[in-house]
Every structure is written in C-alpha cells, then in structure tokens.
Amino acid sequence: MSKHNNSVPLEYQGEENDLKIFGFWVFLGAEIVLFATLFTAYFTLVDRTGSGPTGVDLFELPPVILETFLLLTSSFTIGLGVHAMRLGRVKPMIVFYIITLILGAGFIAVEVDEFITYIYHEDATIQTSAFTSSLMTLLGTHGAHVSFGLLWGIAIIIQVAKHGINKRTANKAFIFSLYWHFLDVVWIFLFSFIYLKGMM
C-alpha cells in the first residue's frame, strides 16, 4: 500500500469507495430536495387549520426537547464510532454504533407517543386539516427515515462484528454516519421552524 493511501481514511481508500461516497452525497442532495418540498408545503398550509388544532394547541416543549437531546446526542456518539473505526478499534466502534441506535430508537418511541397524543387526544389526524396533513407528512417522513436508519445501522453492526474493519465495512459504516448526521440536521430545522415557531 502506498504512503498516499495510508494517509487517506480507510473508508475513502480505493476508487470504488470514493465513488460510493460521492454517489451518496448525490443521494443526499435528492433527499434535501424532498425535505425542502415538504417544508415548503408545510409553510404554505400552516395557517389552514380549519376547525382543527393549531401548532399552539399541539406542540409541547418537554417531548420536543427530549427528542432533540436524543437525536443530537446520537449524532455525537456516531461521530465517536467513526473515530474508533479510523483507529481500527472494532469493539468501541460497535459500542458507539449500538448507543447511537438506542438513542435513535428512543427518539422514535417519543415521536410515536407524540403522534398518539395528536390523534387520540387532540383529534389531529392527517385528514383533520391542511395544517395537520402537511405536519404529519413532514414529521412522518423524517420518522420513517430514522426508522430505516435503525435497520440499516443494525446491518452495519452485524457486518463489522462478522468481518471486522476493512475498506468495505468502513465505507458502509461511514456512509451510514453521513445519513444519520443528515437526519440530525433535518431535525434541527424541524425543531426550529416547526415546533418552536409553532409554539409562538
């Protein structure tokens, strides 16, 4: 292996790995367009509440703060996982990835409880108003992405546990970390422009 290759993180070594990471950035670009479209629809429909509840009626700070804490902490732990991976330390990497997924599962649990409250206690369903329809579509799409990420993360952990850290598994684990960080960035926008703004 050349000196140059040794100076490059394992997940980037080899043309195929480079292309996979580049391709995933392109995919994230498409995801940005998707969420931008959903945000635009929400902001267009946010005041069309009809006889249904508004954001002030629905949003409560404690569960939103908890969701934010869980997801942003998971972004930190997956960063630690990638760092451990680059040091070639399999067990710490797996531990940090497991913690990340546990935090992600906690986020989903809080969000499911939030949706149950909306539907059964606030009579806010996807059919109640244009506002609730756009809100639930946006939150649900993000939640579905996190749920998919949990399954993907489990698959990554299994592969690393089975095959160790090599160019192939490092590339997959790094791409997954990009996906997870992307979901955290989307959540910051949700927290700031949907929840906080909606409570005002």
Image: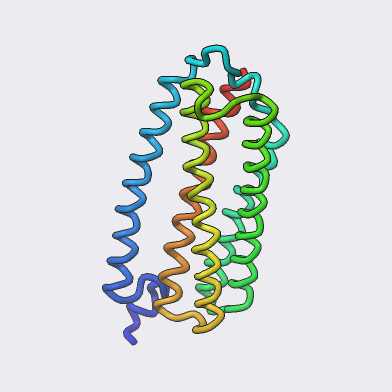
From this view, report whether residue 7 is shown above or below residue 110: below
Image quadrant in which the N terminus is located: bottom left
**Residue at figure coordinates x 51%, y 29% from the top left:** 126
Indicate the quadrant where residue 94 lies. Answer: bottom right
**Residue at figure coordinates x 33%, y 47% from the top left:** 29
Which residue occupies the extreme bottom position in the image?
A: 1
**Residue at figure coordinates x 67%, y 51% from the top left:** 106
Q: In the image shown, does 159 or 3 lie closer to the viewer?
A: 159
From this view, report whether residue 41 is shown above or below residue 17: above
**Residue at figure coordinates x 57%, y 53% from the top left:** 75
Image quadrant in which the C terminus is located: top right
Number of on-image labels:
0
Indicate the quadrant where residue 61 lies. Answer: top right
Q: In this rendering, would 110 be left or right of 140?
A: right
Q: Where is residue 16 in the image (x, y as percent from the top left)?
A: 28, 73
Q: Which colour scheme is used?
A: rainbow
Q: Where is residue 88 in the image (x, y as percent from the top left)?
A: 53, 79
Q: Position of residue 196 (x, y in %)?
A: 60, 26
Q: In the image shown, does 19 or 107 lie closer to the viewer?
A: 107
Which residue occupies the extreme top position in the image?
A: 51
Q: Where is residue 85 in the image (x, y as percent from the top left)?
A: 53, 73
Which residue occupies the extreme right position in the image?
A: 62
Q: In the image shown, does 89 or 151 lie closer to the viewer?
A: 151
Q: In the image shown, does 110 or 176 lie closer to the viewer?
A: 110
